[in-house]
Amino acid sequence: MDYLTAGESHGPMLTGILTGMPANVPIDIAAIDRQLTLRQNGYGRGGRMRIEHDTVTVTAGVRAGQTTGSPIGLLIKNRDYSHWQDIIGAAATNPDHLREVTRPRPGHADLVGGLKYDQQDLRNILERASARSTAMMVALGTMTGQLLNTLGIRALGYVTAMGGHRLTAAPVPVDVAGLTTIVEGNDLRLPDDRQLAAFHAVVDAAKAAHHTIGGQFTVRIDGLVPGIGSMQNWRERLDGRLAGALVSIPAIKAVSFGDGPALGDEPGDQAQDDITWTPAAGYGRASNHLGGLEGGMTNGQPLLIHATMKPIPTQPRGLPTVDVRTHAAAQAVNERADVTAVPAASLVAQAMVQLTLAQVITESFSSATLSDLQTSYRAFAQRTEDRKD
Ligand SMILES: Cc1cc2nc3c(=O)[nH]c(=O)nc-3n(C[C@H](O)[C@H](O)[C@H](O)COP(=O)(O)O)c2cc1C
Ligand SMILES: C=C(O[C@@H]1CC(C(=O)O)=C[C@@H](OP(=O)(O)O)[C@H]1O)C(=O)O
């Protein structure tokens, strides 16, 4: 399984291609559109999200609601393109250099991308570096999530901190199924909606002060059998693949598992998860400090992955920079921007986890068709289950 996207932020559309999906997987396009809407709806997002109404069109690989095993083509239109087609359309000449960017924004790809790709108009860099592409990642990830659901695997991304303000209590439901209703029912993807007003106030204060905020989120995955991933070679370690996928999301600067950085401070005997066994449940764990991963493999506990998003780099006041035409000191261009996008990022991370797990699982088990995959996955699960007695 592999996937690619193409598309500029203000170009006509985003394009996605997903190869390696088994045949005969039921695809619910309306459910993908619901996730696209959730990605757009986070409190603290900027004016662009009032222009777009993301929906996906499936152009290949799905027939009558089921995958055929062929490459899947997806597209999401950019409504904003109607304002940009004379500026960045493939045939546009833009003789008046409208919306040209020569004052690169610190924290963005603008400067280094311009140097690397030898572009005088840095818009040619920022258009592609923009996190607009994450809309397509959510469409692709949700589609692979529908495959994972058929194996009993469910993932959920939710927010735990914004602008230095943290959730004050542990979330009440402790499984993905219970958490999903709460998380998808509020506009900050919080697992405890009683704390929504306090988080809204943090976003409002940032907006009023004309600055931006980042935060932290968790992706939890339930239903994975032990033994997904491998300790054999570094490329096969699931922790490495998940971490790589998550830090590839724009603005994600740290990823950890289980107790994360706190593990470095804990005494050794309290930082592991004691192994238990009962005739009814087989192997179990007394805790989940390690977030469900040992030796680069799932251990049957829920996966708990945490990530940190830096504050949105575009600043309403424009940070100090240099004009690339003159090398004179300048104020960075102020593109329209979000105050924060941590809720959206938590959903993008959920999608990246879904894509990564679907890749690893289809690599590990026979997967030409959904029934091939279900048969070989269940046989593997059964073999490890049988070790209970
Ligand atoms: C969902 C989402 C929305 C974002 N919105 C903005 C934005 O409105 N303005 C901005 O400057 N950066 C935004 N970013 C972050 C930038 O895209 C990102 O910081 C930039 O491309 C540089 O990448 P890096 O931070 O990984 O180095 C957003 C990121 C995500 C995931
Ligand atoms: C378009 C999206 O996010 C964009 C990501 C982004 C950036 O620099 O990453 C900058 C902003 O774009 P614009 O300048 O058009 O307002 C965000 O709105 C999206 O999430 O769909």
Image (cartoon, grey):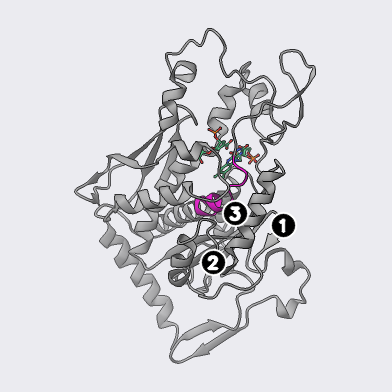
- Which of the marked residues, 1 or 2, is nearer the chain's N terminus? 1
The image position of residue 285, as x and y in percent, is 57, 81
Residues marked 1 and 3 touching at CB (< 8 Å): no
Instruction: Single out the mark in the foreground, 1 or 2.
Output: 2
Which residue bears the numbered disc 1? 164
Q: Is residue 241 left or right of residue 324?
A: left
Q: Amino acid at mark 3?
A: Ala
Label 1 CB less than 8 angstroms from ligand 1: no
Callout 3: 10 Å neighbours few (<14), some, many (20+)? many
Classify the position of the C terminus by image quarter: bottom left
Q: Write the start and end of the magenta stretch as one range.
A: 338-348
Find numbered disc 3 in the image and state the secondary structure of the residue it sits on: helix
Q: Amino acid at mark 2?
A: Asp
Q: Nearer the viewer, residue 343 or 232?
A: 343
Quarter of the displayed picture in which ligand 2 can be seen: top right
- Which of the marked residues, 2 or 3, is nearer the chain's N terminus? 2
Which residue bears the numbered disc 3? 243
Assign the magenta stretch its main secondary structure: helix
Count of labels in the image: 3
Callout 1: 10 Å neighbours few (<14), some, many (20+)? few
